[in-house]
Image (cartoon, coloured by chain):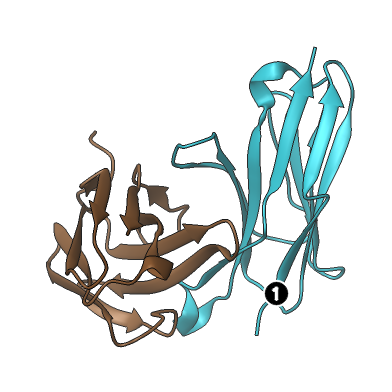
Chain colours: A brown, B cyan
Amino acid sequence: DAGVIQSPRHEVTEMGQEVTLRCKPISGHDYLFWYRQTMMRGLELLIYFNNNVPIDDSGMPEDRFSAKMPNASFSTLKIQPSEPRDSAVYFCASSPGPKPQHFGDGTRLSIL
Amino acid sequence: ELKVEQNPLFLSMQEGKNYTIYCNYSTTSDRLYWYRQDPGKSLESLFVLLSNGAVKQEGRLMASLDTKARLSTLHITAAVHDLSATYFCAVITGGTSYGKLTFGQGTILTVHP
C-alpha cells in the first residue's frame, strides 16, 4: 500500500509568495492531520479533518494559513503571504479512526 | 492545556547498555503513542498504549503506561547503534477531541560503539 504522499518534498521561495503544500492520505483513512516541525517549537498540530470536514484548526498560527480537503484523497495547506518564520518541515498524516497516525515524508519549506 | 514532557532530551548511550526515557503528561488521556524519527525522515509509529498498566514490547524496546501517575516509559535494553534516532511520546485526548495529538519535545538518542 502506498503511504501518505506529500508534495513537494522541498520548497524554497521568497517572502511574500504564496505556498501550497499537498497531501494524499492513505486510502480508507478518514482522519487527516497537518503538523509543523521546527527546532524551537517541536511538532505542532495545525489542523485536522475527519471525513473531509475540519474539526480543529486551533493550531493554525495566523490567517495567512489555510487548509482545505475537497475530497477524501486530497488536502492542501496554503500560506499566503509567506514569511521567513514559516520555514519548517510540514508533515501530513492520516489514520483510520482512533489508530496510530501514518506520517508522510514531509515538505521542507524555506522562505527567504 | 495538555503538556507533554520528556526526560531526558538528549541521551548518549554505549552499545549494550540499558536506559529509560520518561514521558509525563499533565491531564487525563485516552491513549499514548511512541514514535521514532530518523534524521531528515518521517515519523514511524512504535507503540500505542491504551490502558493503565499496558506494556508493549518490540525487540529491544519496551513501553509502559501508568495513567494514575500520568507517566509512560520507553525502556531500551542492550542498546545497538540502529536504535539511534529521536523518540517522541504523544498523548491524545478522547471524545470529540480525538485527533488532538500533543507531542513531547523528543529525546535524541545516540548509541555509541
User: Which residue is drawn at the image coordinates 73% and 79% (left, top)?
Assistant: B27
Residue A25 can be seen in this image: no
**Is B19 in front, or is A80?**
A80
Residue A93 sits above or below residue B44 on the image: below
User: Which residue is drawn at the image coordinates 26% and 51% (left, top)?
Assistant: A12
Query: With B78 as the anchor, is A24 left or right in this view?
Result: left
Outermost residue, top side:
B113
Across and down, in percent, residue A33 comes to 35, 64
Assign a secondary structure to mark 1: loop
Quadrant position of the N terminus of chain A in the picture: top left
Q: How many marks?
A: 1
Quadrant position of the C terminus of chain A in the picture: bottom left
Identify the image quadrant of residue A21.
Answer: bottom left
Residue A52 sits above or below residue A91 on the image: below
The residue singled out by tag 1 in the image is B3
Across and down, in percent, residue B10 comes to 78, 43
User: Which residue is drawn at the image coordinates 35% and 42% (left, top)?
Assistant: A105
Across and down, in percent, residue B108 comes to 70, 41
**Is A38 in front, or is A91?**
A38
Q: Label 1 sits on what residue type?
A: Lys
User: Which residue is drawn at the image coordinates 85% and 70% (left, top)?
Assistant: B68
Across and down, in percent, residue B65 comes to 77, 55
Identify the image quadrant of residue A58.
Answer: bottom left
Residue A15 sits above or below residue A5 on the image: below
Query: With B98 as the anchor, is B76 left or right in this view?
Result: right
User: Mark 1: few, some, or many residues within 10 Å (few <14, many ≥20)?
Assistant: few
Residue A82 can be seen in this image: yes
Query: With A112 as the anchor, is B83 left or right in this view?
Result: right
Q: Chain of mark 1?
A: B
